[in-house]
Image (cartoon, rainbow, N blue to C red):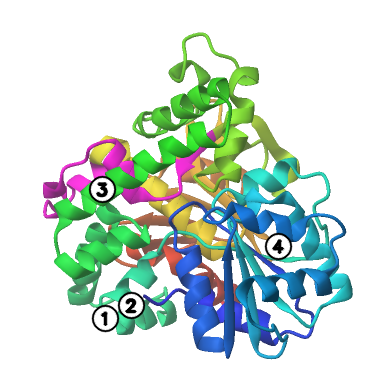
Amino acid sequence: MKRQLYSQLIEWKNSKRRKPLLLQGARQVGKTWLINHFGQNEYKNFIYLNFEQNPNLKTLFTGRLIPSQIIENIGLYLGEKILHNDTLICFDEIQVVPEAITSLKYFYEQSPEYHIVAAGSLLGVQLGRHNSFPVGKVNFMTLYPISFPEFLEAIGEELLVNRIEQHNPFNTIPELLHEKLTNLFKRYLFMGGMPEVVQIYLDSNDILEARAVQNEILEAYKRDFSKYSDASQSIKTAEVWQSIPFQLARENKKFKYSEVRKKARASTFEQTIEWLRSAGLIHIVNNLRAPKLPLSGYADLSKFKLYLMDSGLLGAMLNLSSDRIVNPTALFTEYNGAFIENYVCTELTKSQATELFYWTSRGEAEVDFVFSYKDKIYPLEVKSGTSLNTKSIRSYADKYTPDWVLRVSSRNFSIRNDFINIPLYSSFAISNYLEHLLKK
């Protein structure tokens, strides 16, 4: 299954400024598969070490962390001489051995000729508590669940991906293609982007079997809550995690601690939310006091919304039935459009590589997402139904006069004055469309 991050890995391999690479991402998003695929295809030799599967590997990183000695010991363990020429070394589940994380600093400083990739399902959690993290000595990449364009490529619709990416937003897309893309998008929205779920669907074409795998993944996450934190913290993590789908299902999707536990306060769950974010399981979208650059400087951190990193898992947690796929609008409007807003958040996070915010005005108006692109600020409204009501986004536009006002909905492309509508299935290509708008 082709992953878009693969091309970035090749760039990393060929870079003159290459450092040891830390590949982050939630559990079961395909990090191990991608590294193995990359190592076996792009290198003559590939060495894979999994610190969780083999705890004894920890002994290779005791004492002084001298790269040449570590490499020699790995070679003795494997029974082969390790050369740096055309060799990729992978340290998987590196968060289990903090000393291995520290060693990356010395690989960069003393042995930069070695190509090192490190990965871990809860790597972000470990880095947050690691005192001797090699700041400035590593490169970072993040792998997310399979995106909609990756799904299209997996089912043999690569031409559709190219069509969307190259489309001029000033023109509508042929209605026949719009309908086809909408139907494929609804199928993806139900399944989400967990690689095992997508692969099961490709192999069996069975939506119900895909749902069974989603439930298995959710159970694995619950086990992680207790495996990697103490009993008290694991209970809090489970409480917050279970509350997110139902918080998103409300019309007002702002996160409320009282929905997790009666009379709960921020101090009770702040650490829990950060754990989930560091584990790659959620996205945090903070409220924006004013749309000024830098946006992060005007964020109200006490008000925020939480989104799951995968729409399919959100549907599984809400037990969304598969018949919603064939209904023309049900999947878009179900649970106050929770799936649509969650999907747009994940796609913007993957494709825009920028922080997302939302804006409100005295409880009378709300813009779902606000983000910056090339030093310009864009408001984006998500419409789950076919309503053309633009009161909230217009309230924002009247107050701040942005160059363009964006809306994603089930409708085709359209532009009217400063207002542009983008089909939901094209959310991943918004930066492409902004380039067209900037040239106008």
Question: Which residue is at 69% across, 82% downward?
Answer: 82
Q: Are marks 1 and 2 in contact (CB under 8 Å)?
A: yes
**Circle 4 sits in a helix, a strand or a loop, which is it?**
loop
Instruction: Return the disc, 4 or 3, that comes first in the chain's sequence.
Output: 3
Tell me which label, 1 or 4, sits earlier in the chain: 1
Q: Amino acid at mark 3?
A: Phe
- Specify the amino acid type for callout 1: Gly
Label 1 crowd bin: few (<14), some (14–19), many (20+), radius 10 Å: few
Where disc 1 sits, the SS reads loop
- Residue pointed to by mark 2: 153
Looking at the picture, tell me which residue is in the foreground, 129 or 393.
Answer: 129
Identify which amino acid the numbered label 4 is placed on: Asp
Among numbered discs 2 and 4, the one appearing first in the sequence: 2
Residue range highlighted in magenta: 305-333
Query: Where is mark 4, residue-wise?
Result: 375
The quadrant in which residue 271 appears is top right
The verdict on residue 313 being magenta is: yes
Say which residue appears at 46% left-offset and 42% top-offset: 307
- Give the camera-side residue of 305 and 424: 305
For the C terminus, the image quarter is bottom right
Q: Which residue is mark 3?
A: 332
Image location of residue 273, percent across then percent down: 57, 33
Specify the amino acid type for callout 2.
Answer: Glu
The local secondary structure at tag 3 comes to helix
Picture quadrant of residue 264? top right
Q: Where in the figure is residue 84, as x and y percent of width and height?
A: 73, 85
For the question of whether residue 397 can be seen, the reply is: yes
Residue 200 percent across, percent down from the top left = 23, 63
Instruction: Give me the C-alpha separation between circle 2 and circle 4.
Output: 32 Å
Q: Nearer the viewer, mark 3 or mark 1?
A: 1
